[in-house]
Image (tube, coloured by chain):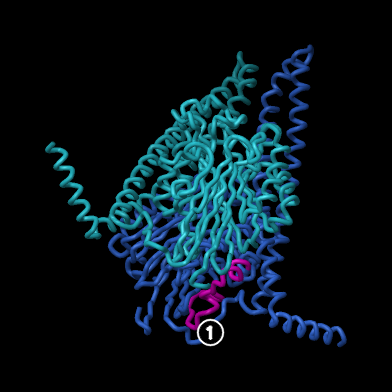
Chain colours: A cyan, B blue
Amino acid sequence: MKPNFSLRLRIFNLNCWGIPYLSKHRGDRVKRLGDFLNMESFDLALLEEVWSEQDFQYLRQKLLPTYPAAHYFRSGVIGSGLCVFSKHPIQEFTQHVYTLNGYPYMIHHGDWFCGKAVGLLVLHLSGLVLNAYVTHLHAEYNRQKDIYLAHRVAQAWELAQFIHHTSKKADVVLLCGDLNLHPKDLGCRLLKEWTGLHDAYLETRDFKGSEEGCTMVPENCYVNQRELEPFPFGIRIDYVLYKAVSGFYISCKTLRTTTGHDPHSGTPLSDHEALMATLCVRHSPPQHTPSPTHGPAGRSRLISVLKEAWAELDLGMAQARWWATFAGYVIGLGLLLLALLCALAAGGGVREVAIMLWTPSVGLLLGAGAVYLFHMQEAKGLSRARAELQHMLGRAREAHDLDPESQAALFLGQQEGDRSEEQ
Amino acid sequence: MKPNFSLRLRIFNLNCWGIPYLSKHRGDRVKRLGDFLNMESFDLALLEEVWSEQDFQYLRQKLLPTYPAAHYFRSGVIGSGLCVFSKHPIQEFTQHVYTLNGYPYMIHHGDWFCGKAVGLLVLHLSGLVLNAYVTHLHAEYNRQKDIYLAHRVAQAWELAQFIHHTSKKADVVLLCGDLNLHPKDLGCRLLKEWTGLHDAYLETRDFKGSEEGCTMVPENCYVNQRELEPFPFGIRIDYVLYKAVSGFYISCKTLRTTTGHDPHSGTPLSDHEALMATLCVRHSPPQHTPSPTHGPAGRSRLISVLKEAWAELDLGMAQARWWATFAGYVIGLGLLLLALLCALAAGGGVREVAIMLWTPSVGLLLGAGAVYLFHMQEAKGLSRARAELQHMLGRAREAHDLDPESQAALFLGQQEGDRSEEQ
C-alpha cells in the first residue's frame, strides 16, 4: 500500500419500511429506491426493514450492473429485514441473531417474529480490510413506559461485543443501521464507549439535511405525527458509525440526509430518512486520536455506562423472574383445577360442566407453561449479558486503579468536589 | 517475547453428565471431579453438561484457590451446560447460541430447551493471545435415522464461522467439547476444513487411554450398552482441537483419556471419558505446516465438504418447508372446522357437541400455528447457513480455478482418471 494511500467510500443507509400489505406505496418506493441507488452508485448500500424477500430479489436484479454483490440476512420467522448491495466483491459474510428480541405474545409489535440481527460483511478494498455491519434493534413503542428497554440494552451490548470480537483484524469498521436509540440513550452510549465507534453526524464538518440530523422527521408524510409530538425537529435513531484501527485514519467528509421527501423532492422513500456519507480513509493520522476507552476520562465514562447498563439489565432480570414465578403459580393453580375437574367428572351432578371446563384448563396450563419457559429463557439471556458487563466493569476498574493518570484525575476530581462542597 | 519462547498448556475436558434428578451419583461425581481438578491443577478445565448452576457454584468455591477464574455460560431455558475454570485470568468472554437446536416438541430429548452454544474465552498468557472455545452440539439419538443431522451440520458451520471470525487476531486457538460427531462425520470434517484446527488425538505421538481414543466406551458403567453395540471399542465424540497462527507453532505433547473408570480406578466421573492434553506452543515452527485449506489438495477437500454440507442443509430445508406447509394445511382445516362448529352451535340439534369441540379446535389451531412458525424459522436458519456455505464454496472454487497448482493437479487427476478408465 502506498504511503499516500487514500480511499473514498460512499455509503448509503435506509430503513426502508417495507412491510408487505401494511406499508404505504411499498412497490413504488422500492422501485424509486432502486433507481436512486443505480444513479448514485454508492460503494455500499445497507438497508433495513426489507421484510419481503421478493423486494430484495427485485432490487438485486435491478441493481446487478451497479452493485454486483448483494446479500439478504435471513433469520427468525419473517427475516431480519437486513440486506446489502455492494459495488465491491464481498469476501465473507455472517450474522448474529440477538438472544433477546421482545415477546412472542406481543404479536401487534411483531419484533419477536423478525429475529432482529446484526449482519457482517468483510470486504477487501485496495488491500484494506473493511468490516461493515448492518443492524436493526428492537423498536421503542412507548418512550415513557418502555417495556423493551432491558432487551434493547442487551441487544446494544451483544452488538458491541459482536463487533469487538469479530473486528480485531479489520482496518476499518463501519456500522450502519436503525438502532432505535436516541444519541444519548444508554444503549447508544454503551455501544460507542465499548467499541470506540464515532458518529458520522457528530464528526463531519459538512452536513446537509434535516434539523439536528434527525432520521424521523415530522415533514415526512408517512410518519405518525402524534408519536413525534414531543420532538419538534424529529428524532435521530439511524446512524453511520465508524472507526479505523491499526494505523489508519478515517474521517467523514460529507453527510447528507433526505428531509422528508425523496432526494428529488417527491414523496419520501420511507418513513425514515436516508443517510448518505462520504468517508475518507488515509494512512498516517494527522493527529493521534486515542480510542475513547483509553485515557482516564474515557475509562471513567466507560465504567459509568457499564454500571448503568448493568443496573438496567438487573431490573430486567428481576422482572423476567417475576413473570416466570407468576407463570409458575398459574401452572400450580391450573394443575389443581384439573385435578378438581377430574374428581367432579368422575363424581356426580356437575359432570358435564367439568368435562366442558377440562379443555380450557389444559389450554391455561399449556399457555402458562409457555410463558414460564419464555421468561426463564429471558432471565438467562439478561443474566448472560449482565455477567459479561460485570466482568468488563471489573477489568475497566482494575485498569483505572492501576493507571497513575487516573489516580491524578481522581485526586483532582476529589479536590474539585471538595472545593464545590466548600462553596 | 524471547525467541526461544515456549509455553506448556495443560487442558482438561469432560462432558460431566450432570442432569439434576436423572444422572446417577451426580453429587458424588461432582465432588470427586473437584478433588481431581484441584489435585492436577490444569491450566484450563472446560466442562460440558453442568446443567445445574448449583453444581457450578459448588465447583467454583472448591476450585477457587487453584483456578481463580471461572465462568458459566447461561443460555436457553436450562442453560448451555458449559463452564470453564482457569488458572490464569480471563481477559474477555462471550458466547454464541446456535440458531438451530432441535425441536421444542421433542421434550424427551430436551436439547431445544438447553440453548446449546459455543463459549469463547480470551486469555493472555506470557504475551500470547489464546482464544479458547468450549461447546456442546446437539445429541445424536439415532444414527440410522438421524432427524437432527441438518441441525448438527448447521451448528458445526456456525461454530466454524464463529471461530473463524472471532479468532483472527489470536495466536493460539483451542476448541474443546462434546461435538456429538464421530471423526469422519460431515460436521466434524466441515469444522476442521473451514477452521484449520488439528485433532489432538490424531496429532500426538504420546497417547494413553481408551482404544482408538474413544470418549464413550462400553467399560463405563454409566453408558447405555445397547447404544454402543455397533461400536465394540466405543465412539469418539469429545475433542481437543487446536491451531496456532501468526508465526507460532503448537503441538500436542501428550493426550490421556480416562478408560471407563475415574482416574484412580473408582467409578467413572461421567458417562463420557475425560480428555487431558498437554500442548506446547513455541515460536518459529520447525517445519512449515500450511493450513489444510491452503494448497490445491486442501482446497479440493474444502470444496468437497462444503458441497456435501450444502446438500445436507438443502435436504433439511426441504423437510422444514414440508412441515411448515403441512402445518399451514392443518391451520386451514382448523379454521374450517371452527366455522362449521360455530354454525352448528348457532343452529339446532348437536349444539352441545359443537360447543364441546370448540375449545379442542382452537387448541389444534394454536398448536398448528406454533408448528408453522417454528418450521418457518427453521427453514430461515438453514437457508442462512446454506447461503454462507454457498458463498464460501464459490470463493473456494474461484481460488481453485485461479491457482496454477490446482490446474496441474486437476490435469494430473484427469490423466489418472483417463488411465484408470482405459484399464
Residue B349 point in image, percent of width and height: 79, 13
Q: Disc 1 sits on a residue from what chain?
A: B
Q: Residue at the right extreme?
A: B422
Residue B292 versus residue A305 in the image, above or below: below
A261 relative to A179 in the view: left or right:
right
> Which residue occupies the foreground of this view, A360 or A14?
A14
Residue A226 point in image, percent of width and height: 53, 24
Q: Which residues are magenta?
A: B190-213
B174 relative to A67 in the view: left or right:
left
Residue shown at 53% from the left, 72% from the top: A1
B386 relative to B34 in the view: left or right:
right
- Badge 1 is on which residue? B288
Q: Residue at the left extreme?
A: A422
> Which residue occupies the foreground of this view, B206 or A119?
A119
Residue B134 versus residue B214 in the image, above or below: above
Residue A216 point in image, percent of width and height: 54, 35
Residue B194 colored in magenta in the image = yes
Residue A52 versus residue B217 in the image, above or below: above
Number of numbered discs on residues:
1
Residue B353 point in image, percent of width and height: 73, 19
Give the crowd class for mark 1: few <14, some 14-19, many >=20 residues within 10 Å.
Answer: few
In terms of image quadrants, where is residue A114? top right
Q: Find numbered disc 1 in the image and state the secondary structure of the residue it sits on.
A: loop
Does any portion of residue B235 appear in the rendered image? no
Residue A88 colored in magenta in the image = no
Residue A165 versus residue B205 in the image, above or below: above
Does any portion of residue B106 appear in the rendered image? yes
In terms of image quadrants, where is residue A345? top right
> Which residue occupies the foreground of this view, A254 or B315?
A254
Q: Residue at the top extreme?
A: B348
